[in-house]
Image (cartoon, helix red, strand yellow):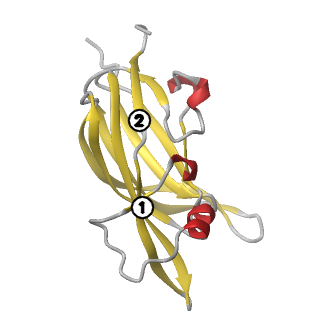
Amino acid sequence: MESTENVVNIQITIDTDGIMSDFSPNPSPNPNNPVGTNHRYSYMVATSANVFSAQTEGTADLEIQANVGDYINWHITSEYGNVKNPVIMTDIFKYSGTNVFNNITPTSVTENTVVMDSESQVSLQNQTFSFFSAHIENAGTEGYGVVFALYYVDNDEYKIYDYYKWDPTIIIEEIGLG
């Protein structure tokens, strides 16, 4: 039988200006004790073929459709494309519901990709992309946590503003069964 495994890519954008406006920098950021945030700072999107409910597109709780056996990748960036106030995902963990995912792991790949320089010239350059990946094990609803580090520039040096987390819910609807 042919493999029908697909990859669902979820792009997360973090409103770093909002976080930095509402939270002070932490002089002793602790990755084991991230600050909880509400859903107004996080936006998730996926390709239209994988979105189950259009009303959830661009929200902190995205409903996607996929098949058991597919893979899911979470990519994260600031509203500035990580040029300013970059964010790095540090963890994804389950906290409630169905065991939708299995083996959530940080992943990095280096790809030869198109970039544009200041003179609008396009060239190929190797870039490394980091994301978290998991295998979809079951259809259902899972509450999970996303932890990320927010960085800022101080005297030409990147420093951690703090670690943050929020608790999205993801609903996996089996394609063809919904």
Q: Nearer the viewer, residue 61 or 136?
A: 61
Q: Alpha-carbon neighbours of circle 1 within 10 Å: few (<14), some, or many (≥20)?
A: many
Residue sitting farthest toward the bottom = 155
Tell me residue 47's x, y (percent).
56, 31
Q: Amino acid at mark 2?
A: Thr
Residue sitting farthest toward the right = 119
Tell me, yes or no, whether the two marked residues, 1 and 2, touch with CB atoms within 8 Å: no
Task: Identify the image quadrant of the N terminus.
Answer: top left
Q: Amino acid at mark 1?
A: Tyr
- Disc ID at residue 152: none
Tell me residue 75's x, y (percent).
46, 49
Q: Quadrant of residue 57?
A: top right
- Is 47 left or right of 178, judged from the image as shown? right
- Going from N to C along the chain, the mark reached first, 1 or 2, is 1
* SS under mark 2: strand
Find disc 1 in the rendering and name its residue. Answer: 164
* SS under mark 1: strand
- Residue visible at 76% across and 64% down? 120
Disc 1 from disc 2: Cα separation? 17 Å
- Residue visible at 47% across and 27% down? 64
Q: Nearer the viewer, residue 60 or 174?
A: 60
Look at the picture and state if 157 lies above or below 62.
Answer: below
- Disc ID at residue 169: 2
